[in-house]
Image (cartoon, rainbow, N blue to C red):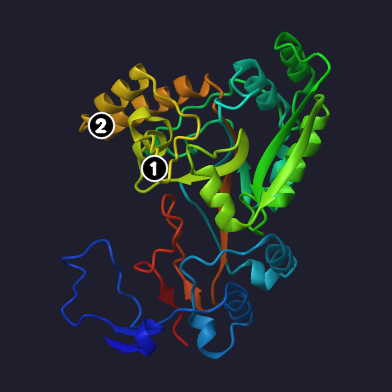
Amino acid sequence: MANENDGERLRLERNPHWSAATDAERKAYPDTIDVRSGLDSSVINQRLAASQGADAAAVTTDTNLGPAELAKVTGDKELASHVGTGHFGYTNYLAFNPKVKPFDDPKVRQAISYAVDRSSVINAAGGSSLAEPATTYLPNQKSFGHTKYDHFPAGPNGNPKKARELLKEAGHQDGLTITLTHSNAKDFETSPEIATAIQDALKKAGITVKLEGLEENDYADKIHSVEDEPGLFLSHWGADWPSGGPFLAPIFDGRQIVKDGANFNTGFLDDKAVNDEIDEINKLTDLDAAAERWGALDKKIGEKALTVPLFHPVYKRLYGKDVHNIVISDWTGVLDVSQVAVKQS
């Protein structure tokens, strides 16, 4: 192993003692792996698209194609054949702070849930190739315990009629004006484009949305502060390991509300029944049984309308023209370098 420039370049050679007889997981196809770091994502994708010289045998572990890059690649049949697809246990959602009016009223939260147009949100996120609609908090993967439900069926384009009915029941027959906080950063998770798509959809239900765009650091500080958390904002969460636990516990376990630091329980849910069920599931050693319970708990929490699941991201990654065996993990979203092979010239 050789290390250059403080880790910006790392050259790895196959362990001479490796044997397929004792390691069924890794394939050890490449003789050497030359690791480079510190490159801009646009440079990485340009080099992979060109596939010249050593770049023909190159991969990226976690550099995704953006909407514009994907559109260009899709229009090129040769390039399109060198794109790997993967999913990560990740959910992008609208978060409510029920301590802020009018979001203390469940009917208002339900109305917004019905009013959201997921098709327009997905278009704003780069299209159906990069995002899949979500009506559940848990992503659609067995290991997380995904259980299908849709408590506030809005269809692909929203249900403004049902939203108006709920607003009327909540005493807002003349409509409602609210603020949606988002990041000004140009990523597809909390971007101004997604905020605008939500603004347009809610307008059809009689809800006027004022947009509050913050710089990335200010945004992160505000949405994770118990004292300053806004009433409605764009958020997202991903798994630390393939289970429903790292999804539901940090966001919905009342004992994990952090008053003097970064808080992720955005709805400030502190329900003894939910907390107790989290403890009981964590005691299970049968992963399938635990997954089923996580799914049931997700469905139960979903009834409270503390979040509006919007979409789960899809990852598209270019790889060099001589590369084979591309596998992108469905819970880390990272390319599995232990499977990669290069075509013999």
Q: Tag count in the figure? A: 2
Name above or below for residue 164 compared with residue 59: above
In depth, the one of 322 and 242 nearer the eye is: 242
Q: Secondary structure at mark 1?
A: loop
Check disc 2 and report the residue beneath it. 282
Q: Earlier in the sequence, mark 1 or mark 2?
A: 1
Quadrant hosting residue 274: top left
Residue visible at 36% across and 48% down? 240
Q: What residue do we see at 35% from left, 35% from top? A: 256
- Which label number is shown at residue 260? 1
Near mark 1 (Cα within 10 A), the count class, few <14, some 14-19 or many ≥20, is few
Residue 7, position in %: x, y?
36, 82
Secondary structure of the residue carrying numbered label 2 = helix
Q: CA distance from mark 1 to mark 2?
A: 26 Å
Where is residue 83, by image quadrant?
A: bottom right
| Front-lying residue, 280 or 258 | 258
**Residue 102 image point, x, y percent:** 66, 22
Residue 291: percent from the left, percent from the top?
34, 31
* Residue 175 seen from this side: yes
* Kind of residue indicated by mark 2: Asn
Q: Is residue 175 above or below residue 317?
A: above
Residue 126 or 29: which is nearer the viewer? 126
x 26%, y 81%: residue = 14
